[in-house]
Image (tube, rainbow, N blue to C red):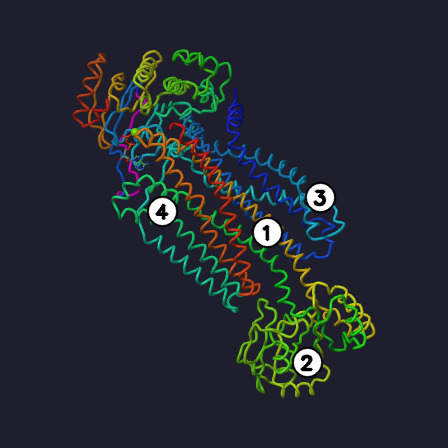
């Protein structure tokens, strides 16, 4: 089943097509099946974040259509979109975006709270997910009192708590050291294999990308290559590096 | 767990943000209420100078209300902005912008309700003190402390409107919140600034030209009483200041960029200062206006107060004077001599100056309560005013005594019919006169040739009057003589027919000491009201600066963290922060002082021109100096706090 399907998305920043405008996306076709773990890679400025923002309804495409879980989000009103986001989409950001004033548990719970779920259900859900990601024991701590890796795990937990159809992650390891980064990527793999979550992750880190099952490379706003893992991470990692070398990615950053 | 639990929790954590908004609102409400209670104090109202007080307090209330809109709006916006990240997260998790607006509204309702309670309660407490101070300044006995229901109603009503306005403005802003913008709000740095010299120069030229024009307008007796000219000119000055501030960033950049070497050496500092001007142009502009008001409001009443003696001397050239005309104030020589002899301070000079009170019809005469102007002959005029003008037959010289708006109806060259005789006006200008404008209520007096005077005199026998003027050794010691004279004149007037006697309400005994006392009284009220207003603006300006720094702390820290990583040393960071703060703290003060000086310059011309200029300028300078001093203290305190916060990593 297709969870995400897009047709010819373009995005032009800065109004009309003139000298001052930027064509950040130039006709992107993309489709993601349920249970897939897809990575999006490309040099910086290639339009990765723009793509993610548009797919998740945070930004509006200039042209093109996006279908998630069988519904077209480009025709939704703002309110419909908000509700849709709440129930069907999960987000993980590079900056974690946790509220400093809430404990980790409350942060993770927030989507359920907004959806007015009953307490027993929430408690149960929280316990399940936070235990899975090994942060249940620090559930009453505040974001500033835990490590970046733990914050990101809370953010990942939050993205999953409402059982979304798809989770979008924008450089989730961008602010983490290699150890935490490794842990978080294992987490994504875990949620993909154990919970069968569908994940679309943007990254420029080949190591993080090697956890994915499929990688889409974009350059200058266009999809230019696509590779699929054969199951061996080391082998996949090497192939990613080769692809980056071809499209002129940021090899030296790895 | 419900969302309200989260909301309450957030409220507790963000208390500091709520607090400043709450304090601003409470403070404005308290202040307004204090003035309102005074306006509606019953015993104060019955206390005589009803009209002046009403006008002054009414004006104060208007200013406070207008100011509150700005002040509360500012605090509100800062408050909402500081929570953008939080709102952004809510929205990615599926809240609509409608939900966000609902949160804003609910939180605001709480803040507003508690501000009303706090503001009114503290207002009740402080207004007691306030009323006592005002009563003692006005020297009003038996003023009772009273709280009228109406002052509560007015305060609540006015602030309901203020908050409604602020919330409406805020809704316009938050109507289309975008997640991306919200999440990056704290991170979002300045827009790109182009390096352009011209707009900045243009703004500066407009400023300088409009200031010069203002000086010219102030100096010109015809223009400076024309409200249209004055208002347009002031607006032009504001425009000049705004354009200068708004384009200063681009101009600085353009000037520095010309020199590549110094640009690269100071690139951080230059971009920082440029962006300060750019991001904060509105704040700097508003602060400039506030500063000019502070200078003007504090300096002018103090100058007036210290000038009371001089001004009363100018308005009342004679220590005591009265006019006897139309049979009114017809005191016998014997009685007069008797009163003068018993004066505690010796009489030094006494004049009897004959004049004709001649009917007069012209637009300019509207403000002349007698519908007549005093006319004297040129020899008497030159003798008693120490002048040396010449007026030939058929001519008339118009000496303007008291300057009121709309009082320039007699132009040189026009024809006047005075006492049945046609005369040509040779000159019409501010000039000394033998009496003040109050002993025979008029705005100007006429001087004719000796020959014309004789002719007019024989044709208008009933209009012959006499100005009695007296100078004493010590005019401050003349109260007893004045009281006796007033009583004697009153007794005399009681004997004449009521029809004529109505005139005695207008033709009274005038004295410098009375004018002086009245002036002092009026000025002390003026000082009090405007000083409070100045203080208010001072607090407001300070709070705005404080909020600004406060809301910027986080993004500044992130920036300096980054700079730290790339090797900016502490000393350099401190230097940049200091200079950047100097811009926000002192550029409004500089613009404000320049404007303040020009408003005061204008003011002196309304009050009395060159004669009082020195005092006004001295006071203005004292106020400006004190202001700079306060601001410096404030600057150093803020800088320390800000640096401690921003440069934590260093
Ligand atoms: N809000 C924006 N306004 C204008 N241009 C933008 C905006 N966001 C991104 N861009 C431009 O679009 C292009 C793609 O940006 P982005 O999607 O952030 O790239 P990536 O995430 O791959 O580094 C870049 O050229 C960038 O400058
Ligand atoms: Mg990006």
Q: Between disc 1 and disc 3, whose residue precedes?
A: 3
The spot of residue B334 in percent (x, y) is: 81, 76
Q: In front here: A69 or B408? A: B408
Q: Spatial distance from mark 1 to mark 3, Cα to Cα?
A: 23 Å
The spot of residue A120 in percent (x, y) is: 50, 14
Q: Between disc 1 and disc 4, whose residue precedes?
A: 4
Q: Between disc 3 and disc 2, whose residue precedes?
A: 3
Q: Spatial distance from mark 1 to mark 2, Cα to Cα?
A: 43 Å
Residue farthest along the right direction in this orientation: B495
Q: Secondary structure at mark 1?
A: helix
Q: Residues within 10 Å of mark 4 (few under 14, many from 20)?
A: many
Q: Quadrant of residue B439?
A: bottom right
Q: Spatial distance from mark 3 to mark 2, Cα to Cα?
A: 53 Å
Locate the C terminus of chain A by quadrant: top left
Chain containing mark 2: B
At 47% from the left and 37% from the top, the residue drawn is B638
Find disc 4 in the rendering and name its residue.
B249
Are the residues under badges 1 and 4 in a single subunit?
yes
At 26% from the left and 47% from the top, the residue drawn is B259
Find disc 3 in the rendering and name its residue.
B147
Q: Residues within 10 Å of mark 2 (few under 14, many from 20)?
A: many
Are the residues under badges 1 and 3 in a single subunit?
yes
State which region is magenta.
A2-19
Chain containing mark 4: B
Locate the N terminus of chain A by quadrant: top left
Quadrant observed for ligand 2 in the rendered image: top left
Mark 3 near ligand 1 (CB under 8 Å)?
no
The spot of residue B240 in percent (x, y) is: 42, 55
Q: Residues within 10 Å of mark 3 (few under 14, many from 20)?
A: some
Residue B496 against residue B95 in the figure, above or below: below
Q: Between disc 2 and disc 4, whose residue precedes?
A: 4
């Amino acid at each position: 089943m297709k969870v995400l399907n897009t047709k010819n998305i373009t995005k032009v920043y800065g109004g009309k097509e003139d000298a001052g405008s930027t064509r950040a996306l130039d006709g992107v076709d993309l489709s993601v099946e349920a249970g897939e773990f897809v990575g999006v890679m490309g040099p910086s400025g290639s339009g990765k974040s723009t793509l993610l923002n548009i797919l998740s309804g945070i930004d509006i495409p200039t042209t093109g259509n996006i279908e998630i879980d069988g519904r077209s989000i480009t025709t939704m009103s703002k309110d419909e979109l908000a509700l849709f986001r709440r129930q069907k989409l999960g987000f993980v950001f590079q900056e974690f975006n946790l509220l400093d004033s809430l404990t980790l548990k409350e942060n993770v719970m927030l989507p359920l709270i907004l959806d007015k779920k009953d307490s027993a259900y929430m408690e149960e859900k929280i316990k399940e997910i936070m235990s899975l990601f090994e942060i249940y024991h620090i559930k009453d701590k505040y974001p500033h009192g835990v490590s970046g890796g733990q914050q990101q795990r809370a953010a990942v937990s939050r993205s999953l708590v409402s059982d979304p159809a798809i989770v979008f992650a924008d450089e989730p390891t961008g602010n983490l050291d290699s150890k935490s980064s490794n842990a978080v990527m294992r987490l994504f793999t875990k949620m993909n294999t154990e919970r069968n979550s569908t994940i679309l992750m943007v990254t420029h880190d080949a190591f993080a990308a090697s956890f994915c099952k499929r990688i889409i490379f974009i350059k200058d706003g266009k999809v230019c290559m696509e590779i699929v893992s054969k199951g061996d991470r080391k082998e996949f990692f090497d192939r990613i590096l080769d692809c980056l070398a071809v499209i002129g990615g940021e090899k030296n950053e790895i | 767990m419900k969302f309200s639990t989260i909301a309450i929790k957030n409220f507790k954590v963000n208390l500091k943000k709520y607090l400043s908004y709450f304090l601003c609102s409470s403070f404005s409400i308290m202040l307004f209420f204090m003035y309102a209670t005074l306006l509606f104090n019953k015993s104060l109202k019955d206390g005589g100078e009803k009209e002046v007080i009403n006008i002054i307090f009414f004006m104060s209330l208007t200013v406070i209300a207008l100011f509150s809109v700005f002040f509360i709006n500012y605090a509100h916006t800062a408050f909402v902005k500081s929570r953008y990240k939080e709102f952004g997260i809510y929205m990615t998790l599926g809240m609509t912008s409608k939900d966000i607006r609902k949160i804003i509204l609910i939180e605001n309702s709480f803040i507003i309700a508690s501000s009303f309670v706090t503001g009114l309660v503290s207002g009740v407490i402080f207004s007691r003190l306030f009323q006592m101070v005002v009563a003692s300044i006005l020297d009003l006995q038996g003023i009772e402390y009273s709280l009228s229901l109406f002052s509560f109603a007015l305060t609540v009503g006015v602030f309901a409107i203020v908050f409604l306005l602020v919330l409406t403005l805020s809704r316009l802003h938050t109507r289309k919140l975008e997640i991306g913008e919200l999440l990056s709000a704290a991170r979002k740095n300045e827009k790109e600034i182009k390096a352009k010299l011209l707009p900045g120069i243009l703004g500066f030229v407009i400023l300088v030209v409009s200031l010069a024009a203002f000086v010219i307008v102030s100096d010109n007796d015809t223009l400076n009483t024309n409200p249209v000219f004055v208002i347009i000119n002031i607006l032009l000055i504001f425009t000049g200041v705004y354009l200068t501030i708004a384009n200063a960033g681009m101009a600085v950049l353009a000037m520095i960029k010309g020199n590549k070497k110094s640009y690269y050496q100071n690139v951080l500092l230059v971009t920082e200062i440029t962006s300060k001007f750019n991001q904060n142009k509105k704040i700097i502009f508003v602060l400039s206006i506030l500063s000019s008001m502070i200078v003007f409001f504090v300096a002018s009443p103090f100058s007036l107060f210290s000038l009371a003696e001089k001004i009363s001397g100018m308005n009342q050239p004679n220590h005591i004077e009265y006019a006897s005309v139309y049979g009114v104030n017809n005191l016998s020589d014997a009685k007069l001599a008797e009163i003068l002899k018993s004066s505690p301070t010796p009489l030094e000079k006494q004049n009897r100056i004959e004049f004709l009170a001649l009917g007069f019809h012209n637009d300019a005469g509207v403000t002349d309560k007698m519908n007549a102007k005093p006319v004297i002959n040129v020899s008497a005029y030159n003798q008693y005013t120490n002048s040396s003008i010449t007026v030939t037959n058929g001519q008339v010289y118009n000496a303007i005594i008291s300057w009121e708006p709309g009082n320039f109806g007699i132009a040189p060259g026009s024809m006047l019919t005075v006492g049945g005789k046609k005369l040509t006006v040779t000159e019409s200008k501010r000039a000394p006169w033998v009496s003040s404008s109050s002993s025979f209520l008029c705005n100007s007096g006429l001087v004719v040739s000796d020959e014309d005077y004789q002719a007019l005199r024989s044709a208008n026998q009933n209009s012959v009057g006499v100005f009695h003027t007296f100078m004493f050794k010590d005019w401050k010691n003349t109260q007893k003589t004045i009281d006796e004279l007033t009583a004697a004149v009153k007794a005399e007037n009681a004997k004449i027919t009521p029809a004529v006697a109505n005139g005695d309400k207008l033709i009274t005994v005038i004295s410098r000491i009375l004018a002086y006392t009245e002036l002092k009284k009026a000025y002390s009220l003026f000082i009090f009201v405007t000083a409070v207003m100045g203080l208010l603006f001072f607090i407001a300006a300070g709070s705005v600066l404080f909020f600004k720094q406060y809301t910027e702390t986080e993004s500044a820290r992130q920036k300096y963290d980054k700079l730290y990583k790339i090797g900016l040393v502490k000393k350099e960071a401190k230097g940049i922060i200091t200079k950047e703060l100097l811009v926000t703290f002192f550029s409004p003060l500089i613009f404000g002082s320049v404007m303040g000086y020009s408003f005061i310059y204008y003011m002196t011309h309304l009050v009395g021109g060159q004669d009082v200029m020195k005092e006004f300028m001295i006071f203005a300078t004292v106020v400006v100096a004190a202001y700079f001093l306060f601001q410096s203290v404030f600057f150093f305190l803020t800088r320390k706090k800000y640096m401690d916060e921003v440069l934590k990593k260093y």
